[in-house]
Amino acid sequence: AALPGPTPADWAQAPLDPAVRAVLVGFDEHFSYAKLCQALRYLLRGGSDCLLVGTNRDHRLPLEGGAAIPGTGCLVKAVETAAQREAFIVGKPNRYMFDCVVSEFGIDPARTIMVGDRLDTDILMGNTCGLTTLLTLTGVTTLDEVKGHQESDCPARQSLVPHFYVDSIADLLPALGD
């Protein structure tokens, strides 16, 4: 999306699609100021009747070798800041996505394990949904962070503690062969 003209007045007066009733913020490697302006205009035009939905709040996406790139949470935060309202998050750690899967496929939480590499999304969602949780230490979380939460008296921090952990997802391969 390009800005529709050279000045802010042009950007604020470009036509909007009257059928749009929601702004969805997800991973977008082409996120731009123009898209941010358009999202804000739809949200302002629709008021509370225009939904603001985010896919997740991941701040960073880890890459091999310890590198990272900004995650979708950064884009969600940009739109929330501009619109001065909070997005409804459909992905982790919100249980919305899990409830949809349970409803569609009849999943039994007592027989389900959540495997993930982030405490604040994967493990929190698993614990909130009553799942067994398994942390892989190949992402942004360290074992020292887990121990800090485990030793805390704070219930919010305790909800970030996984049931189990492995250094790598590859550590599970022998168990899957049984």
Image (cartoon, grey):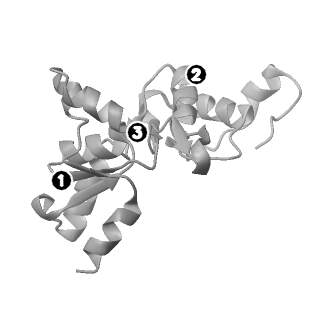
Task: Measure the C-alpha gap from mark 2 to mark 1.
Answer: 38 Å
Whether residue 45 can be seen here: no
The residue at which mark 2 appears reads as: 82
SS label for mark 1: strand
Which residue corresponds to the image point at 62% horizontal and 42% vertical from the top-left?
Answer: 67
Q: Residues within 10 Å of mark 3 (few under 14, many from 20)?
A: some
SS label for mark 3: loop
The residue at which mark 3 appears reads as: 141
Query: Residue 85, image x and y in percent?
Result: 45, 23
Which tag, 3 or 1, sits closer to the chain's start?
Answer: 1
Quadrant including the C terminus: bottom left
Between marks 2 and 1 in the image, the one whose residue lies nearer the viewer: 1
Query: Residue 143, image x and y in percent?
Result: 34, 38
Query: How many tags in the picture?
Result: 3
Which tag, 2 or 1, sits closer to the chain's start?
Answer: 2
* Quarter residue 74 falls in: top right
Which label belongs to residue 132? 1
Quadrant including the N terminus: top right
Circles 3 and 2 in contact, beta carbons < 8 Å: no
Which residue corresponds to the image point at 56% horizontal and 29% vertical from the top-left?
Answer: 79
Task: Measure the C-alpha gap from mark 3 to mark 1.
Answer: 18 Å
* Quarter residue 108 falls in: bottom left
Query: Residue 137, image x and y in percent?
Result: 39, 47
Which tag, 3 or 2, sits closer to the chain's start?
Answer: 2
Instruction: Determine whether, in the image, residue 114 is placed left or right of residue 45.
Output: left
Q: Is residue 96 above or below residue 161?
A: below
Instruction: Determine whether, in the image, residue 149 is placed left or right of residue 106.
Output: right
Which residue corresponds to the image point at 63% horizontal and 47% vertical from the top-left?
Answer: 28
- Residue kind at label 3, given as amino acid type: Thr
Task: Measure the C-alpha gap from mark 3 to mark 2.
Answer: 30 Å
- Residue kind at label 1, given as amino acid type: Thr
Which label belongs to residue 8? none
